[in-house]
Image (spheres, rainbow, N blue to C red):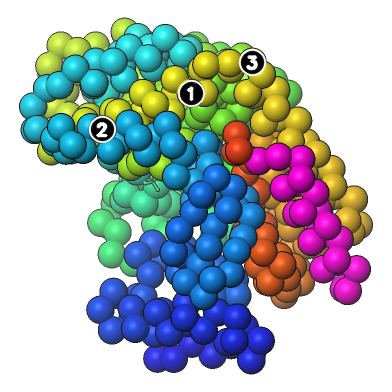
Amino acid sequence: MSTEVPPEVAKRHRRSIASLDRARESVAGGVTSTVRTAARPVPLYFDRGLGTRLWDVDGNEYVDFLLSYGPSILGQASPVVAQAIAAQAARGMTFGSQHELEIEAAELLTKVVPNADRAIFSSTGSEAVAAALRVVRAATGRSLVLKFQGHYHGWFDGMFASVGNSMGTEQAIIEQPVPQTIGSAPGAAADVIAVRWNDEDALVAAFDQYGSSIAAVICEPLNVNGGVIPPMPGFLQLVRSMCTDNGSLLVFDEVITGFRLALGGAQEFYGVDADVTVFAKALAGGFPISAVTGTEAAMEVVSSGRLIHNGTFNGNPLGCAAIIATVSELARDSEATYTRLHALGGQLAAGLADSHPDLAVRSVGPISISVMGDPHNVVRIQDLAGSDDSRQQSFVEGLIARGIHSQGLWYVSTEHTTADIELAIAAAQEILALV
Ligand SMILES: Cc1ncc(COP(=O)(O)O)c(C=O)c1O
C-alpha cells in the first residue's frame, strides 16, 4: 500500500511517506500506536527534538505543542532528565531487584501528591490503571467500576469501552460499556458501567441502583480525552461524596493532568481528594514509567502483601531516575512554574479563540483543544455533535505546513516562551484567514 497525498504534501514529507510505506512491510499497521494513523497530513517520522523544537526526517522544523501527547512537560531532551537517565544507565539499567532510587521516587511522590501515603510503579498508564482497579476491587471486596462516557483510561480490556465512538449520539444515562476494538474478551467490561460526565442525575441514579456494589468511580478529573471538558462546578465534589457515602473509592486517572495542572495534579487544582491516583506521561518527562499512589487505607491490600503486583520493569532504575529528575525540577520553584504554565496556556487559548469565530477552543491552563465547528459550550461529550471534520483537518494540516506541531491538542511545556505562543497564534490566524 502506498500513501496517497496531494503533491505539496508528498514533496514536504517525502521521507516520512517513504518510511511509512517501508514500515508497513514489517510493522503491523505501519504505526506502533493505532491512534497515530490519524495524524495529519501523514504520520510524521521524527529525527530529533530539543526544548520546544522538533525536526522530522525531511528536515522540517516544528514548534512542538503536542509534547508526545503529554510526557514532554520539560520539553524535548530535557538536560536534567537526559543526564539523570544517562548517569543511571552507566550504572545498570535494570536489576529485577530493589534499588534506592525507587524509594527516593516514592518518597518524592508521597511528598508532593495529595493523599499519596504509598506508591507502586509500572511502565505505562494503561498498566497503572489496571493496577489501580485491582487495588480498589481488593480494598472494597466489590467488583463494579463506574466510569464516564468519553473518558479514556488506556487500552486494556474492560476500560477500553465507552470511550469515543459515541460522540454526538444520545446514550443511555447508565450504559453497559461496549468494547472499542475487536479482540476484546467478551464480558471484559461486564463489571463496568458508564455514566454521562457532568450529569449529576445520572450519577445519583447509578449509585441508587448499584451503590452497594460499586468498588470505585474512575475519572479523568478534567476530561481531556473527551475534548477538554472540565468538571462542572460541584461535580467532582458530588462524585467524592457519593463515593464516601456508599463505601466506594475514588480513582483519579491523572495520566494527563498529573504534574500538569499543578504539582499535586488535579487533586490540588480542584481541591478534591482521591483515594487512589494514577500517573504516567509527564511523571518522568518522557521516560515510560507510571505510578499508582493512594491513601494508606486504600493501599493496605498492597502494603500487606495480599494483592499481587508483579512486573519485571516495575520501578526500574532508569524510570525512577527520570521521575526524580522531572518531579524535582517541577517542584524546585513550583509556584512560579505553574503560574507561568497557566499564563502561557491562557495566552495560547485566547489567541487561538480570537483567530476565527468557528474555532472552538476549550482550555484549562496548559491544556487546550481547538476544534473547527464545535459548539463553544460543551458540558458532556454528547454536546460535541457539531465538529466539522474536513475544516478541522485543513486547520491541522495548515499548522503542520507552518511548522506548528499540534493535532488540535495543545500542551504547554516549561520550555515554551511567549514568542513560541505568538508563532502558533500567527499560524492559526494565517490559516483561518483563508477559510
Ligand atoms: C487519561 C489517560 N489514562 C490512561 C492512558 C493510558 O496511558 P498509556 O498510553 O501510557 O498506556 C492515557 C493515554 O493517553 C490517558 O490519556
Q: Which circle marks residue 329 in the picture?
A: 1
Residue 142 drawn above or below residue 37: above
Tell me if residue 3 can be seen.
yes
| Quadrant in which residue 246 is drawn | top left
- Identify the residue under disc 2: 87
Magenta range: 416-435
Magenta-drawn stretch contains 429: yes
- What element does badge 3 sit on? helix
Q: Quadrant of the C terminus?
A: bottom right
Task: Report the disc number at residue 77.
Answer: none
Residue 391: x percent and y percent? 76, 71
**Disc 2 vs disc 1: which is toward the camera?**
2
- C-alpha separation, residue under disc 2 versus residue under disc 1: 17 Å
Question: From the viewer's perspective, is 112 left or right of 170?
Answer: left
Question: What residue sits 60% from the left and 75% below the top?
Answer: 41
Identify the mark nearer the N-term, 1 or 3.
Answer: 1
At label 3, the amino acid type is: Glu
- 19 magenta-colored: no
